[in-house]
Amino acid sequence: MAASYSRTMPTVLVIFGATGDLMARKIVPALSHLFANSKLPHMLQIIGVGRKEFTDESFRAYIADLLRQQKEQQPFLSHIFYHQGNFDAAATYQTLAKKLGYIDNSWRVCSNKLFYLAVPPLLYQSMFLNLESSGLTIPCGPDEGWTRVIVEKPFGKNLQTAQGLDVLLGALFKEEQIYRIDHYLAKEMLQNILVFRFSNNLLENVWNKDGIESIVIKFFEEVGVEGRGAFYDGVGALRDIGQNHILQMLALATMDNPESLTSDAVRQKRAALLEQLPGLTDEQITKGTSRKQYIGYRDIPGVAPDSQTETYFNINFNLTAKRWNGVQVSLEGGKKLGETRKEIIVTFKHPLRCLCPPEGKHLKNKIIFRTEPREEIKIIFWSKKPGLDMHIQQADFDFIYQQTKDHTQAYEKLLLDCITGNQLLFVSTEEVKAMWRFIDPIITVWQKNLVPLMTYQLGEVAK
């Protein structure tokens, strides 16, 4: 449930990794837009924490240059400050705690505090321990100022590491204070799946194993991993987009009616669906999955010359939950696939003899939820061609949404939800564990090379 929010609440946003790529490309433009549209608290300080030796003034100049490059407004520069230090050094957090104490004293109030870990997940463990030992996460009192933390995916590298991080997080924060960002959940189209399914009563009665034959999810990216070789080579496509984005898309398409759009209700239904995903056997994984690497990947700086990391994967299985038992699912995604295409394709059954003259082909209806190359919901049905003869043609009914630019708008929504206390678009610990329980056996089989790593030419798989 979203907490009450007032722009009069003094708030301090601490961003670890303030000179990194995520800060430059996503966080700064998002904050700029929110400030320009009067969405942020009146009393606000944004403290960037990084290793580089900036002063407040030079850091503001750095941020101003980023905004000029992106042709963004710069009205909130006076709210930005800098704190230099190493993320694994206790002294960084101790001096930061003093700085936050000075802010509260000057404001004569205990401010809300939001800690954003915009850093590689491998740093989380030491940072959580330092946050705890420095006292930064201790609230002033039960009725004064909240404390929250934002972490970016991937949440762990497998179920074991995800549970380890949860133990550390749980020592510092309650679940309602933890905001695990999967920016893809903030896509307008994914939010519209809930409205399309549950605010309309046209299809829900056949949105099950009796009405649906298959669900295909594609997450094709035209770009490669240039500039991210060292990071990506330790992750791979399945962990990068399969364990999070794609499984969240599947959850939205197949979850039960949450009966309300509160964060608790929606997250519980997403988690319930994910917890019912089948535990695939070694044989099912061997027969139903494939993994590939695009030619030229190993030449990227940071990538091992004998790398076994997949840049593409395909997973095929049948759902086993009561509502969906037997429905075929295909999950597919990766890099350098010749096009950017991200969509959910729901194919309906046509169990009766099809009235499909004259060819007699058994035609099937489909619904496509697509985020790229353009945001749309497409319904595929069939109609008679104009003319004297009885010929049937495909007819599409499109709901087209305005294309947003990259992930900036998604980060605006997510940052504002963190401040207002709305967790609907954030992943719960139950969801994280359920997704890893499904993915871990696949990775284990792949690591045994029971599913050989194949190669593909750029754009080949998408054809």
Image: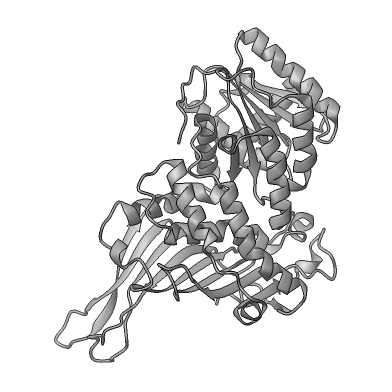
Residue 134 horizontal/vertical position (percent): 78, 25
Q: Quadrant of residue 197?
A: bottom left
Against 169, residue 222 (above or below) is below
Number of numbered discs present? 0
The color scheme shown is: one colour
**Does residue 310 appear in this view?**
no
> Which residue sits at x=51%, y=50%?
185
Quadrant containing the C terminus is: bottom right
Residue nearest the viewer, comparing 154 with 445 = 445
Q: Is residue 47 left or right of residue 207?
A: right
**Does residue 443 appear in this view?**
yes
Residue 31 horizontal/vertical position (percent): 56, 32
> Which residue sits at x=48%, y=43%?
424
Residue nearest the viewer, comparing 187 with 242 = 242
> Which residue sits at x=52%, y=37%?
412
Residue 423 horizontal/vertical position (percent): 51, 40
Against 91, residue 444 (above or below) is below
Return the residue found at the far bottom. Answer: 359
Q: Is residue 347 left or right of residue 219?
A: left
Return the residue found at the far front. Answer: 322
Quadrant containing the N terminus is: top left
Q: Is residue 146 left or right of residue 199?
A: right
